Amino acid sequence: MPSIDMSYDAVVVTHRHFDHFDEAAKEILNADIPLFCQPDEKDDFLSEGFTDVRPVDNELSFNDIAIHRTPGQHGHGQLAEEMAPVSGFIFDAGETLYLGGDTIWYEGVEQTIAQFEPDVAVLNGGEARFNQGAPITMGVEDVNAVRDATDAHIVVVHMEAINHCLLSRDELRSETENVCVPEDGEQITF
């Protein structure tokens, strides 16, 4: 396992599903670290002992970085409603990073890209799905739709992260162009 730099100024949680915030995160994180989250999840973090919880309703700033919460749709139809709420975030410090979170390509992502014109877009891929139904995270078509909508550098993460991420890194690389799909622990610099 690669070593992890545990120095950090803040934490952003797109949503509280176990693959994004788990018991290990609760134990490792300092309770007084600024923790940015969805408004609906503020009380859960406070009840777990975090003392500097900062829900992002629309926008706030941190150390000269404007943070905007963006919409997400974690799947399709009824399943997406059951998986909600999920969010993405825009970080604007002169250059703009879009962290899509667990979402598929839909009008909310398209509108976010059009509004903020990110320089870098970090997408959760893997085409995760359950035994039935459509994917709940981005697959090849979703990533290609983002690629078509922006000139941003695109990085796809969350690949092969959990057992229901059925799309491999190699498959995504072979079916997309101008998309970075890093290995676990690989660091990307732009």
Image (cartoon, rainbow, N blue to C red):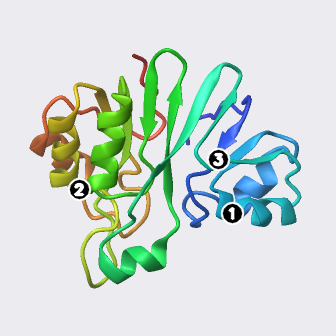
Task: Please tell me whether mark 1 or mark 2 is closer to you in this view.
Answer: 1
Q: Is residue 25 left or right of residue 166?
A: right
Query: Percent position (x, y) of residue 178?
Result: 18, 28
Q: Secondary structure at mark 1?
A: helix
Q: Secondary structure at mark 2?
A: loop
Quarter where residue 96 is shown: top left
**Residue visible at 36% across and 51% down?**
159
Query: Percent position (x, y) of residue 98?
Result: 43, 35
Quarter where residue 2 is shown: top right
Q: Is residue 65 left or right of residue 134?
A: right
Task: Please tell me whether mark 1 or mark 3 is closer to you in this view.
Answer: 3
Please tell me which of labels 1 and 3 falls first in the chain.
1
**CA neighbours of label 2 inside 10 A, class few (<14), some (14 to 19), many (20+):** many
Q: Which mark is residue 41?
A: 1
Q: Is residue 19 left or right of residue 34?
A: left
Please tell me which of labels 2 and 3 falls first in the chain.
3
**Residue visible at 45% across and 17% down?**
95
Query: Percent position (x, y) of residue 182?
Result: 35, 35
Quote the CA–CA distance across marks 1 and 3. Answer: 10 Å
Query: Percent position (x, y) of residue 90?
Result: 49, 36
Residue type pointed to by label 2: Gly
Q: Which mark is residue 59?
A: none
Say above or below: 82 vs 88. below
Residue type pointed to by label 3: Val
Q: Is residue 156 visible?
A: no
Residue occupied by mark 3: 56
Residue type pointed to by label 1: Glu
